[in-house]
Image (cartoon, coloured by chain):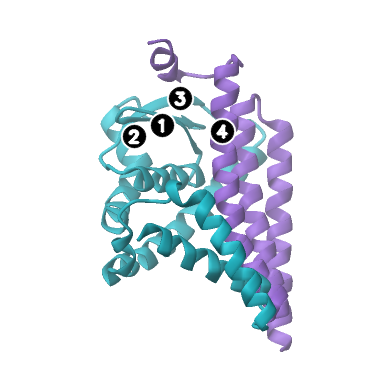
Chain colours: A purple, B cyan
Amino acid sequence: MNNMEALSTIFICIGILFNLFGCIGLIRLPDVYNRLQAATKCVTLGCCSILLGVFFHFGFTDAGIKALVAIPLLFFGATVAAHALVKGAYLFGIKLGEGTIKDDYKDAVKS
Amino acid sequence: MRYVALFIIAFLFWLLITFNLAIENIIVGIVAAGITTVLFGKYFITGVNKFIQPHRYFWLIIYIFIFIWECIKANFDVAYRVLHPAMPIKPGIVKVKLNIKGDFARMMLANSITMTPGTISVDIIDDYIFIHWIYISTDNPEEYSEKVSGRFEKYIKKIFE
């Protein structure tokens, strides 16, 4: 049982570390689109890792199974939300930030 | 047929999240799954007989492992770009041709692209998917469509088509 405790602590620490990277990216990156990149990837994997740690902590009890079921829900929720935010921000008229080198979407939206 | 499949999935989901096999709980679960089926049955995927073909599950398991590996790589990639003092980014939106048909397969591909290194799917218009990419490494369309979607397309074709 001790091994499981160690494993859950390791997973929770990794998750917190990735959430921290996601927050740093949210502050440092230049525009909405790049910030969403950091927010979706790092924060989603960080939360999945924390939930996995919770599952290892509780084992096959009701709380552990709930943590396991929450992983696919969080995953689909985060990806669909990121897609909706990017598309909404673009159609609302927010410009791509400095240093952008290509924009194929502009022509497609106009036509 | 699709209503029955949705009912079974909703009921199994209810049993998983409540994790309680008392008779009252099962009755409430049947009622809740029935309401879900009546409300959302018409939006459920077509072609439910795909659920009972075992080779699709085999490819799904392989796909999940490849996907988790890509996902971890994506995280280290983004963490590297965020923590690097000079922030090596070259963002932009690129257009990539899709080779797969079917709404559900396309949705899974778009979700997979969102979770892989430095890419977010923005929109699908006709047969093209638009992707916001944090670091555009080449100017050649062939090369970057291979990089963005080539890894997943062949598995998704086998699983969902």
**Amino acid type shown at disc 2:** Tyr
> Disc 4 designates what residue?
A84
Where residue B100 sits, quadrant-wise, is top left
Disc 4 from disc 2: Cα separation: 23 Å
Q: Earlier in the sequence, mark 2 or mark 3?
A: 3
Same subunit under labels 2 and 1?
yes
* Tag in front: 2 or 3: 3
> Disc 3 designates what residue?
B93
Tell me the residue at 48%/64% (across/down).
Answer: B7
Q: Is residue B8 above or below residue B68?
A: below
Q: On the rendered structure, is B69 left or right of A77?
A: left
> Disc 2 designates what residue?
B144
Q: Earlier in the sequence, mark 1 or mark 3?
A: 3
Tell me the residue at 44%/14% (across/down).
Answer: A106
Q: Chain of mark 4?
A: A
Q: Earlier in the sequence, mark 2 or mark 1?
A: 1
**Amino acid type shown at disc 4:** Ala
